[in-house]
Amino acid sequence: MLQKLVINNYAIIDHLVIEPDAHLNTVTGETGAGKSIILGALSLILGERADTTVLINKEEKSVIEGYFDVSSNEVFKKALAAAELDYDPQCIIRREIAVSGKSRAFINDTPVTLTILNKLTSLLVDLHQQFDHLALEDDNFQMEAIDAIGSSAEVAENYRKLYYRHKTIKQKLADQRERHAQWQKESDYKQYLLDELLQASFKEDEIEQADLLLKQMSHSERIISVLQTARNFLDEGEQPLVNELKKISQQIQGIADVMPELKPLQERISSVWAELKDIAGELENEEGKVLLDPEEMERLQQRLDLGYKLFKKHGVKTTAELLAWQYKLEDELKATLDINDAIDRLAREEGTVYKELVTEAEKLSAQRKKVIPSFAKKINELLGLVGMPNARFDIRLGEIAPSPHGIDHIQFQLDANKSGQFQSLQKAASGGEMSRIMLCIKSLTAKALHMPTLIFDEVDTGISGEAARQVAILLRELSQYHQVICITHQPQVAARGSRHFYVFKEPDKNKRLSTKVKVLQQDERILAIARMIGGEQPSEAAITNARELVEV
């Protein structure tokens, strides 16, 4: 609720502080005293546009601040979080208009755009002025009103959960289908690439090994010549080194009995002989491995050419990288099958949830159809009491595709003069009538609906007597559940307020008229209401009447 409104340097307001209570706050004053100016200032912190013409002192900025108790407003708290703004039980909304004309808005000292400001403050204040039809044109409000009367809020909430669940699944399904379509465009080419790699059927390190083997084969004659020369020198020449070492070893062994210190040398020579004998054998083995097969060389060259071609095609440099690319293609093509499975699963889930959604929507629609006649009847009864006896209120219900509010399209209609022809409210009702219709609707839904601070600007225009009294009663009843601020010229309405603000003008120190606001005490209220009844100099009868109104 609104705890305090502070206005500085705005129009004919130098400085003003208004602190309404939690129930019905009535605002009275002479025409031109500044009541509409106060509403204009309030509109600024609700996100309305502004200009420098509102500045009294052209050398100072205009500042309007609203202090709101939002401790029990869970919807507003969630909206703050969605807008990434800090939460505090007391929310301060501030609007500044600089001398240059630049306007800035703040929520809890954090700068925000007018769009965000308007969205968030709509959860704090419902400013219903003459010719303001937005609320009654809002399908959401109309649905909430019907559901509140029919105690269908729980069914409506269950439906909304199903609706957004279905919407989420449907979006996931659309995303998967789009992804599948994109993959389908690429899958043929990817399959071609994979088939090419599978047909090549390269093994680990095969291309590198083929390159090395081919180089060996191209130098096979030289390699064999070197290996043969080495082997001949060691083991097969006219005087092979292995045989000579063996002779030396035997000769030294023959004198070792007379010269024992030669024994270690003999053993070392014998060891060298054995090592060279082994080397000669390995040289022979290596010589046997060297291939001179032209057909094999051609095969290796073909594999090498294919490998290098695929290297270039896929932008890789090794067999390992080429095989990694092959495995990646296999995984991606397998993922296409996984997408098909996901699409099938989501399609089944979407169908199941949609059936549940339709069932819940039909249940909700049935409850609405059941309650609409009695709701319309109650509104018509109230309209008769608030000065619209010839008006007939009706509700047209049509069927639409599932929406966040169900499968119903609701239109509030009015026949203002018993003509038998109903039109939408915005076409059939005047500004004053629209305000009274809104008051009737909100009075019926007050207990069930969470509503922000309700501000009515001259809801009682064009009525008097019993109709004005009934409007006052509705406002007072509404204020038992919501904070209400009502600007009025009717004594019956003014007298019902739990707090009475009187707006007036008086000259400041510069003899310039400035708007002031005063909270009236009991005797002051009686006098102010008596003046509303009998003029500036009210009679005793007017004062008595005023006292009776206040003390009811």
Image (cartoon, grey):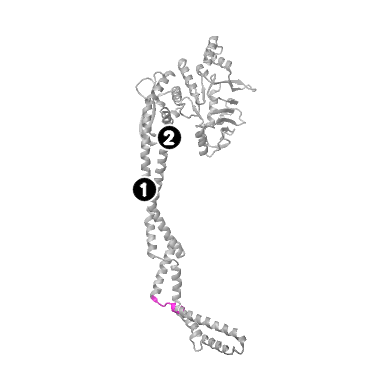
Q: State the CA–CA distance, disc 1 to disc 2.
A: 29 Å
Left or right of 476, for residue 181: left
x, y percent for residue 405: 41, 34
Q: Which mark is residue 446?
A: none
- Please, what is the three-letter code of the amino acid marked with disc 1? Asp
Nearer to the camera, 101 or 386: 386
Q: Residue furthest front?
A: 257
Q: Which residue is label 1 attached to?
A: 344
Q: How many numbered marks, from 0 up? A: 2
Q: Is residue 459 magenta?
A: no
Q: Are marks 1 and 2 in contact (CB under 8 Å)?
A: no
x, y percent for residue 411: 39, 29
Nearer to the camera, 102 or 303: 303
Q: Is residue 292 magenta?
A: yes
Where disc 1 sits, the SS reads helix
- Please, what is the three-letter code of the amino acid marked with disc 2? Glu
Where disc 2 sits, the SS reads helix
Residue at figure coordinates x 42%, y 23% from the top left: 429
Q: Which residue is label 2 attached to?
A: 157
Residue stretch rendered in magenta on the structure: 286-294
x, y percent for residue 414: 39, 24
x, y percent for residue 378: 40, 22
Circle 1 Cα neighbour tier, 10 Å, few/some/many (<14 / 14–19 / ≥20): few
The tag earlier along the polypeptide, 1 or 2, is 2
Do we see residue 414 in this rendering?
no
Do we see residue 293 in this rendering?
yes
